[in-house]
Image: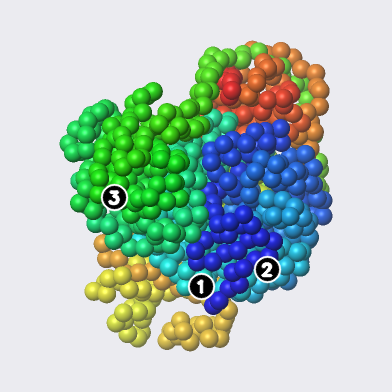
Amino acid sequence: MSHPTTIDQGIALDARGIRFQGGPQLVLCASLFYFRLPREQWRARLAQVRASGYTCVDVYLPWNFHETAPGRWSFEGRRDVAAFLDLAWEEGLYVIARPGPYICSEWDGGALPAWLGLDPQLRVRQHEPRFLDRVTAWFDQALPLLAERQYPANGPVIMVQLENELDFFDCEDRTGYLTALRDQAVRHGITVPLIACSGQGDLEGATGDVPGVVPACNFYPDDDSPHIEPEVRRYAELLAERDLPLLITETNRRHRTLRRLLASGASLIAPYLQSSGWNFGYTPSAGNWGRPGNLMSHGYDFGGYVSSTGTERPEYAEAQILARVIDTLGPRLALATPTAPHTPVTTDFPTSSSPSALRLDGGGRLLAVPHLGTRTGTGTGAGTGTGTGTGPDSGTAVVNGVPVAVAADSCPLMLVDVPLTPWGHDGTLTLASADLVAAGEGVLVFSSEVPVTVVVGDLRVEIPAPTAGVPGRATAKGLTLVALAPAEAVRLRATDRDGTVHLEAPAPARPAPAPVEVRRTRRRAATAPELATGRHELPPTLESLGVYRGRGTYRTTTDLTGVDELLLVGAADIVDLSVAGRVRPTIAGFGATRRINVREATGAVDVEAVVEIWGHANFDDARLPALRLGALRGLGTLWTVRETADVSALWEVHGHWTGRPAPLRELGGWSSTRVGLPVTYTREIRSATAAALHLKGVVEPVRVTVTDGEPLTVDTVPEAHAAHSVHTVHTVHAEDPWVPLPAGTHRISVTLPHHPSGGGLRAELLALDPVTDWTCSAQDDDLLTGFATEAAPGQEVLLPLTLAPGEEAWLDVDLPTSHGGLLLRPDGTQIRVTGWAGGECVGRVWVGDRPDFSGGDANVLWIPPGWSGLTLLVRGAAGPEVPELRVLRLESSD
């Protein structure tokens, strides 16, 4: 389908690239999120991105960050996205705005407000009226801010992204959904390109192939894969057929990989996440990174070129070098088109299986030659055939018959047959084996760690490998050739015609202050108030109690006479369950059914559960109920187990060559030569109460159909019975191998691939009675923050502080002053620590036995500079050790 490519307001897209009002540009873009930084640091972080050579930032606008409760909007303070956009414009950066409505970003709920799940008929990310009505309310707030700041007239916004990686989600009407979002953007006056990114290469799945919505691509390859280039070139070709450029809206952060993407035809390269930040308060998500239920840490950092505290990593200098190459080649590179690498290349090191090249506008080619080997230390460059001099490990590439040195773990952008006329020389640069970072009349400057080979016309010269403070130099046909070490190339200010280089002075290094151990705190006598929410027959969700971020407490008394175990179904996120005064190990099952041994309790006992929200799902992971997008939080349902029966035998077998009457076998016990093909096991199950069917030994997902309807006869086959009955289908996973059953008679069908060498399945049926009559109280983030930031009397205590499981302590901590903020590292066992400073919840740390965490350092809290006061809520958790806060370690993040 054809798409409009020329956009009003100074932006045009076509197969050759992106054209701005001032001409074509190849865009390097860094993710930088206002909602993950203190407002006081916005300008400095934006300036840091600009100083890296990147010319653009992409920024999500999280819906639930601005609509904090239904109909309650906030665009002030750290939520003032308009001010952030204006600062970006002042710092000379473009912006790609990403208002969702869904953003992923490992953010609470993917930015979809938690209360959307309270409407059972509302279906998120679907072409569905109730959801779109709520999206309209959000877009009515966000899109005017973007429309007022579009490039070039009033601001930096050059593109607006609709949705985010929709091809990962089971959207039933992609075209209708994206059309609705596009129409809203147009209604609000968005005239810059509207884009939609594909997360796994399904362009139509991401855009619905809607006219006016430009497909973009997210690539997350293995950096060491030799096959990156042919995959990327395929998408460049597919988009060129629509007269569109390849826009890579997310990818890895490593510049060796980014160079390969550039040479494969990308016009926009936006690595995620180059400039890191923080998940303040209750904003991290529960996601599916690693094992199901993985949590995001307070630090939001995936190793980009700037750390969460603002420290520049080695990739920052790599960014500056790549940006210098792009600036030096200018429009010739911005208008380049992918081409097969006609230049023959052989290497003695691991490299791409199909190297990429670009045909430069005005003549010549740019060739990327990645060295995928690793460094083993400092080498001499010996064996390269290209000269001598110390340098890193290197290998030899033969380009057009010319041997050249290539440093390990690098990807030089070599120039081939490039006219030198734009730089005041009547000749041709036949070959240059290193990055060209500056060019002027009569002077070419290269960045390299190894000797550089340059061929001008038919004259080949070797530039010695530069060393610190000593550039490599050579001349060829009236040209002065200079090679700088990368560390000096990033400081290049100017070059004289005779090759004299002028460098910016290096920034002075500041020694890091020594860590400080804090052992004196004040323990508050009072605890945070609870908001009573009445009595409930069954435990309600926290969202139905008005808690979208925070926690709630559930209490009841139940009779456990004759009961050996409880069954907890649907609990999320983090549950501390106490039965008869004994706090059980913390449950982090994210909705998975849990059995709880209560043999030691009898008679009427008190049951209490504290349930904390550690993040709504940011993805849609079907393996666990609470990881479905839009899933609610709370205790779920608690059942007493009245009876347990083994139901592994007497299953009818249907499929393969089974005849009638159906054979009876144990579950999974049919023998067949048709390995891998599905076979169905069916049996009738009766229960006088609600029940749960437990399939033990599940490895691969199993399909379970529960059929209720007309009475069965001996010869009834499942298909005939299903035609006159109601059936529900469950996909049972190893992470949650349970099927709930109401009271009654059911025909259960279990379909699984035949696996004769597998361990087989066992089945048991648990008869259940619900635990009822609950009282609930709520503590949302506003209530907890209000209590934490109020002045309160306390008594001085010395650490270590030992707590009982389930016991809490509110501690006020005096902080030293710090220019760049402080990293707080609680040391202890079996504790969860929540911190508040500057009137805001900073974040949470879990010390001891805990679920998986992703992101940055999961063991620290960051207190930004100027955020006064520090209050900690420390909660003991049952586990293998006694809960104890031993010491608080403070490190400067200057």
| Residue 745, picture quadrant | bottom right
What's under tag 1, amino acid-wise?
Arg
Q: Which element is circle 2 on? A: helix
- First in residue order: circle 1 vs circle 2: 2
Category of crowding for the residue at label 2, using alpha-carbon neighbours closer than 10 angstroms: few (below 14), some (14–19), many (at least 20): many
Residue receiving disc 1: 242
| Residue at point 65%, 21% (across, down) | 819
Q: Which corner quadrant holds the N terminus? A: bottom right
Whole-percent x and y of residue 19?
Answer: 58, 59
The residue carrying mark 2 is 182
* Residue 123 placement, left or right of 23: right
Q: Which mark is residue 457?
A: 3
Q: Amino acid at mark 2?
A: Arg
Lower sequence index among marks 2 and 3: 2
Q: Is residue 56 left or right of residue 533?
A: left
Q: Within 10 Å of the Cα at label 3, are there few (<14), some (14-19), or many (20+) other Cα atoms? A: some
Name which residue lies at 32% across and 45% down.
432
